[in-house]
Amino acid sequence: MLLSVAAFASAANMRVVDPLLVQLAATFGVSVGAASIAATSFLFANGVFVLVHGPFGDRYGKMPVVAIACLTAALCCLLSAMADSLAWLTAARFLTGVTGSAIIPLAIAWLGDNVSYERRQAVLARFLTGQTLGLMTGAALGGALGDWLGWRSVFWVLAAIYVTAGGALFGVMRAHPDVARPTGGQQGSMIAQMLKVLRRRWVITVVLVVALEGGTFWGAFTFVGADLHQRFDMGFAAIGLAVAAFGAGGFAYVLVAPQLVRLLGERGLCIWGGLGLGIAFATMALAPSPEVEFAGIMLSGVSFYMLHNTLQTHGTQMAPEARGAAMALFALCLFVGQAIGVPIAAPIVDRWGAPPVFWAAAVVLPALGLWFAAALKRRHS
């Protein structure tokens, strides 16, 4: 539960600045485009510095690193709240990304160390409630608090959540010292640990699939809001609610994850998750009304987590003796996929609208699900 709270703050931080850009531009006397550097600096640091935290967690203990990351991220949020220039805010956001990027990958790696493989898929699904809620409400939290109390209040609230999670985790470690012990037992430099993990063919398979999944899914889903506005002239508040249906679909998966794991198995989750994504994006491309596209968005949430949670479960098992390093690679590949997918899709959307990108996702994602299911069959045969 506490790791899920920490994941909520970490995930919310990824999107919380987006609705604040107009206020930041007015505060610092710059354009909205110039103010967006505060968001970009966080995302860049969040994607790159995870490579440091993974091996660090293997060596010194994943739970202590997560707890320290929560408290240092809280401090960086306070620095953001007190910023009196855009340069200060950008630096503080960069440092928040540096510190906060440890939380989600190492929390997942810790679960991999402490939860049996048979139970791991269902437990990871419960952990994902915090991360999903953070992604779902991050922009809404930033917009609502920014309008009500000003943009600085957003960072005070995030700091409070980080402190609550970090302080509670230290309390757990004090009461149960075993949860803080390192389990990787890795020797050598952090780079050597990463290279050792990458020498395994199965690791290459998993991180390649997750990179393609992240690039294809988010490259298309990023433009759902623009599509709703352009095709159906929906207002931005309604668009926010519609996009939040993805998170609702994710919660629906969390509620039935144990039953689905037993019913379908890992290969079935990949196959049906991929096919569900294909149907969801085809529905969005063909939608004659916003209500139909809304249904496609919700289906995409259920289907994405069927496939992605299976990938994440195997991410925890890629290198059991170095789970921190393995999950760092997993998170980096997901980030790189997103960073490449969106720029590829953007000019297509600008010229022809979002439906061609939706159709591409409707073809590629089912193929990925089938590919990974086949790879699982070969691995277990």
Image (cartoon, rainbow, N blue to C red):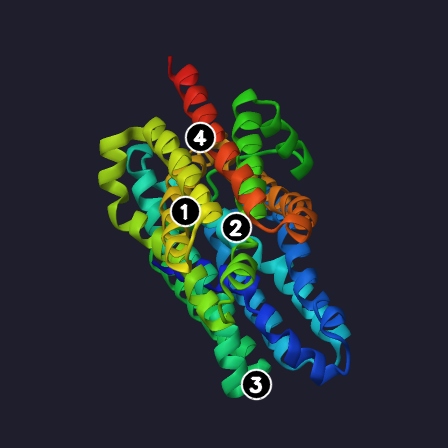
Label 3 crowd bin: few (<14), some (14–19), many (20+), radius 10 Å: some
Label 4 crowd bin: few (<14), some (14–19), many (20+), radius 10 Å: many
Q: What residue type is labelled 1?
A: Ser
Identify the mark nearer the N-term, 3 or 4.
3
Left or right, residue 147 beside residue 180? right
Q: How many labels does the image show?
A: 4
Q: What residue type is labelled 2?
A: Phe
Q: Name the residue beneath numbered marker 1.
A: 300
Residue 91 picture location, percent across and down: 72, 68
Q: Quadrant of the N terminus?
A: bottom left
Q: Name the residue beneath numbered marker 3.
A: 150
Compared to 374, does 124 lie above or below? below
Compared to 367, does 29 lie above or below? below
Select label 3 or label 4 by which is in front.
Answer: 4
Select label 1 or label 4 by which is in front.
Answer: 1
Identify the mark nearer the N-term, 3 or 2.
3
Instruction: Calculate the distance from the C-alpha at mark 3 to the C-alpha at mark 4.
Output: 44 Å
